[in-house]
Amino acid sequence: HWAGPLVVSALATAAVAIYQGARDLSWLSAEPWVGMGRAVGMMGDANPMGIATGLWAPLVWTLLGTGPAGTFAGSVFAGVLWTAAWLSGARMTLILIAAGAVGLAAVWVKARGASWRALSSIAIVTPALAAAIVIVAVPRAGPGTPLARLLEATPKTSAREAAYELFWRRDGYGLAAVEAIKEHPVTGVGVGRFAAASTRYYQRSTGLAIPPDNAQNFWRHTLAEQGV
């Protein structure tokens, strides 16, 4: 019973996001999202909308998949939610979509009495298939899609620099978060205060300036604001 209202709300914001992406990005939205070509649904922010819809897509399919009719309905709802997640342009949705596909494949195989060896094979084959799809999709990725934004933010010079940017620097906000954690490791800088202080922390670390924003990493942002 607890899942019902959450599923309905996720589908509602997904429907609005699909309308925005297909017809009018400015409907129930504003800058900078319109200029970036990213749908926000009814949440006013593309990132949490993408995370919410990306999380619920495999869950609703699993919750409803107790029979043929429920499985079909779940697949339709999951498709709607995944489409909205893609239109959000949030790069985290790439991980959520891949993880959801692996989870659904594992549930499907296990429900048919397969062994753990078969499940291990699924865990290997599904990401490989997803990687092949990504390679095919790269030339066709629109400017506001998660894939295009990921490629744009990834340095092309070396794999080491790409990993450093994706997992640590994060457009400079990761470095700013590290500075905040160093200064206030126990108490943090205060809930909601990191975004405004990010410019100062980044400037202290590099001598350069960036616009105020979050840490681009949920765990590091939480640690920076709330401390240990």
Image (tube, rainbow, N blue to C red):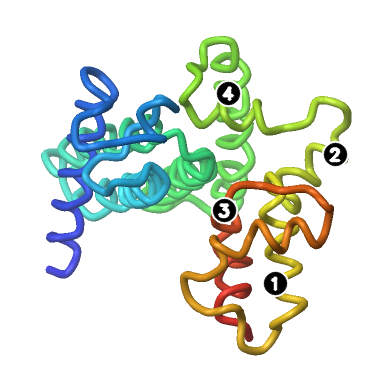
- Where residue 224 sits, quadrant-wise, is bottom right
x, y (%) of residue 130? 56, 30
Question: Which callout, 4 or 1, points to the residue nearer the camera?
Answer: 1
Question: Which callout, 1 or 3, points to the residue nearer the camera?
Answer: 3
Give the amino acid type for the residue marked by disc 2 in the picture.
Answer: Glu
The residue pinned by badge 4 equals 134
Whether pointer 4 and pointer 2 mark residues with C-beta atoms closer than 8 Å, the reply is: no
Q: Quadrant of the C terminus?
A: bottom right
Q: Which mark is residue 212?
A: 3
Q: Pick whichever of labels 4 and 2 is earlier in the sequence.
A: 4
The residue pinned by badge 1 equals 180
- Where residue 134 sits, quadrant-wise, is top right
Q: Residue furthest top?
A: 139
SS under mark 3: loop
Give the amino acid type for the residue marked by disc 3 in the picture.
Answer: Pro
Using residue 4 as the reference point, say whether residue 121 is left or right of it. Answer: right
SS under mark 4: helix
Q: Pick whichever of labels 4 and 1 is earlier in the sequence.
A: 4
Whether pointer 1 and pointer 3 mark residues with C-beta atoms closer than 8 Å, the reply is: no
Q: Distance from label 1 to label 2 (Cα)?
A: 23 Å
